[in-house]
Image: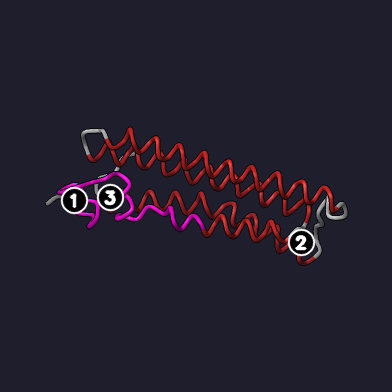
Amino acid sequence: MNFSSLREYFYKLHNLLYVIVLIPLLAFVVLYWQMQTGNIHGVLRQNEYQNQVLLIALSFIVLIDWMISLIMFKRGLKATRTLDSLGKKLDRYYLFTVLRFGLIVSGSLGLAIGFYLTENQLFTILFVSSFAMLFFFWPTPAKVCNDLLLKGDERTLVLYKKDNL
């Protein structure tokens, strides 16, 4: 990723994450609104057994998706911490953060599909919960410093978004 300052780095990172998060969120809101107004109906809404099976299966898939994203992020951080320059560390952190958010949001899309098929409100609760969990992973300067185990000058640069000391 090309960036000329740490402010620009966080600006680009946050903007991309907003796009990654907002696209499925807007899709779910439109889908929910269309169902509430009666314009569309769930395909499987009459079959209670299929609803339960789909709920369990999609919940399991989302859980696996979350676990994969966490494992990939942690492994990526281990390798990233050993790099020699701050710029390289931040580039790799950017990549792994975007990958993490992409995986988590893709699992949330499964919940939106489940809501579309069944009109079960539990999918809404799970969808909102998974998006609420993203706030814990949002890359603030302090979180980046803690994730990368930055110390000294590097920590000061990132924490206060300074260009130089």
Identify whether 66 is placed above or below 14.
above
Residue 146 percent across, percent down from the top left? 30, 50
Task: Identify the mark nearer the N-term, 2 or 1.
Answer: 2
Q: Mark 3 is on which residue type?
A: Cys
Residue 145 is labelled as 3
Identified at 52% across, 38% down, the residue is 68
Q: Gap between marks 1 and 3, in whole Å?
A: 15 Å
Identify whether 99 is placed above or below 136.
above
Q: Which residue corresponds to mark 2?
A: 35
Residue 28 percent across, percent down from the top left? 65, 56
Residue at far left of view: 165
On the picture, is 23 further left or further right than 121?
left
Q: Does the magenta portion include 102?
A: no
Identify whether 158 is placed above or below 121.
above
Residue 38 is labelled as none
Residue 163 is labelled as 1
Between 76 and 30, the residue placed more toward the observer is: 76
Name the image quarter holding residue 41: bottom right
Q: Nearer the viewer, mark 1 or mark 3?
A: 3
Residue 10 percent across, percent down from the top left? 33, 52
Task: Identify the mark nearer the N-term, 3 or 2.
Answer: 2
Identified at 70% across, 49% down, the residue is 113
Q: SS for tag 3?
A: helix
Task: Identify the mark nearer the N-term, 1 or 3.
Answer: 3
Q: SS for tag 2?
A: helix
Total marks shown come to 3
Q: Mark 1 is on which residue type?
A: Asp
How crowded pointer 2 is (Cα within 10 Å; few <14, some 14-19, many 20+) is rated as some
Q: Does the magenta portion include 160?
A: yes
Residue interval drawn in magenta: 133-162
Q: SS for tag 1?
A: loop
- Which quadrant: the N terminus? top left
